[in-house]
Amino acid sequence: MTKSLLCWSCGAGLSELSLPLSRQDQCPACSNYLHVCRLCRHYDPLVAEACTEDDAEEVKEKERLNFCDYFSPDENAYDPAQGQVASQAQEDLAALFGDSVDGDDAIASGDTDDSQTAANKLFGDG
């Protein structure tokens, strides 16, 4: 049984898209481009330039649309652990600064005490 192709970023199914993927194809769920290194079977962050294809030109931004001729979608590109790490980081940031990641909300509402206390704890001043 073959796995279905999933978005490298959000894990949404891409079965309604036809293969080969067009360079301009985007995920219907998160709108990220799909012709990116992170969705390619040659992507490997543990090797030089994160690509196992020796003849491919280096692509600096692995999550951005590119023109690589060696692009081949990988059914195992989506890593749910990556999403959990990002989600946890956002939760930690929100916990540090209150309900909002945007510090302007606290300043606008006059609620800077909790943010100041958290900052003091973070930097050892409190």
Image (cartoon, rainbow, N blue to C red):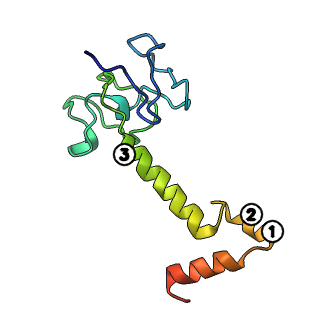
**Mark 3 → mark 2, Cα distance in angstroms:** 30 Å
Q: If you read the primary sequence from the N terminus, does the residue marked by circle 3 or circle 2 appear first?
A: 3
**Which residue reaches farthest right?**
109
Give the camera-side residue of 66 and 126. Answer: 126
The image quadrant that residue 1 belongs to is top left
Return the residue at label 1. Answer: 109
Q: Secondary structure at mark 3?
A: helix
- Of the two numbered discs 3 and 1 on the same chain, state the one appearing first in sequence: 3
Q: Position of residue 22 (x, y in %)?
A: 45, 16
Q: Is residue 76 left or right of residue 26?
A: left
Q: Nearer the viewer, mark 3 or mark 2?
A: 3
Residue 76 is situated, as x and y percent measured from the top left of the image, at: 30, 30
Quadrant for the C terminus in the image: bottom right
Residue 110: name its quadrant: bottom right
At 27% from the left edge and 28% from the top edge, which residue is drawn? 41
Q: Secondary structure at mark 1?
A: helix
The image quarter in which residue 37 lies:
top left
Identify whether 109 is placed above or below 35: below
Q: Residue at x 51, y 32 (%)?
A: 32
User: Residue drawn at (43%, 44%), measured in percent from left and top?
Assistant: 83
- Do the residues bearing badges 1 and 2 touch, measured as CB atoms within 8 Å? yes
- Figure check: 34 above or below 22: below
Label 3 vs label 1: CA separation?
Answer: 35 Å
Decide: is 2 above or below 88.
above
Q: What label sits on residue 105 in the rendered view? A: 2
Query: CB of mark 3 within 8 Å of CB of mark 1?
Result: no
How far apart are the alpha carbons under marks 1 and 2? 6 Å
Residue 81 image label: 3
Residue 25 percent location from the top left of the image: 50, 20
Check whether the beta carbons of the residues at disc 3 and disc 2 lie within 8 A of each other. no
The amino acid marked with disc number 3 is Ala
